[in-house]
Image (cartoon, rainbow, N blue to C red):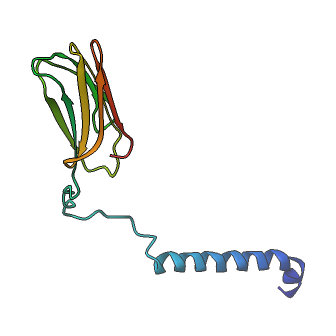
Amino acid sequence: MFGLLKRFWVAAIIVVALIAAVAVVARLRTFFDSDKPYIAAAMPADAIKPINTKRVTYEIVGPPGASGRVSYLDVNGKTIEAAFTDLPWSVTVSTTDPGVLANVVAQGDTDALGCRILVDDKLVAENFANGRDAQAFCLDKAA
C-alpha cells in the first residue's frame, strides 16, 4: 500500500481536497439556509395606498362663449385631445409619481386666450396670447 501511495500521492491529495471542499460547501449552504427552497408568505401583502397624491390642473381661460381645441399630457405622458365650447375650461389629473411633465396647448376662435397649470392648487405656469384665432401654450417640466 505504501508503494501505491508513493506512486499516486498527487491524485490522493486531489481526492482528499475535493472531499474537504464538498464538505465545507455543504456546511456553508446549511449554515445560511440556502439549501431550502423559497416559500412565499401564506397571506398576501397589504395593498399599497397612495400617500402623496399630486393633482395637476390644466385651465384654459378667455372670453365666455369661445370654442376651440385643447391638447394636454396625462400622468403617463400621453397626449389627450379635447374640445371646449365655453370658457373657462379645466381638467385635473392625479398621480403619486414624484415628478410629472405638465403641458397644455389650446387654440380657440377668439382673439384672446390663456392657459394655466396648477399643481396642488398652486400656480406654476401661465401664458396668454392675443391675435386672430389665438393659441396659448403652457409647460412645467417639474410638476
Residue 14 lies in quadrant: bottom right
> Where 108 falls versus 27 (above or below)?
above
The structure residue drawn at horizontal position 17% and vertical position 33%, both measured from the top left corner, is 91
Q: Is residue 11 left or right of residue 80?
A: right
Give the percent coordinates (x, y) of residue 51.
21, 59
Give the percent coordinates (x, y) of residue 52.
23, 57
> Where 9 falls versus 37 (above or below)?
below
Residue 37 lies in quadrant: bottom left
Total residue callouts:
0
Residue 143 vs residue 24, the one in the foreground: 143
Residue 34 vs residue 76, the one in the foreground: 76
> Where 35 falls versus 59 (above or below)?
below
> Where 86 falls versus 44 (above or below)?
above
Give the percent coordinates (x, y) of residue 28.
53, 78
Residue 65 vs residue 13, the one in the foreground: 65
Give the percent coordinates (x, y) of residue 116.
25, 36
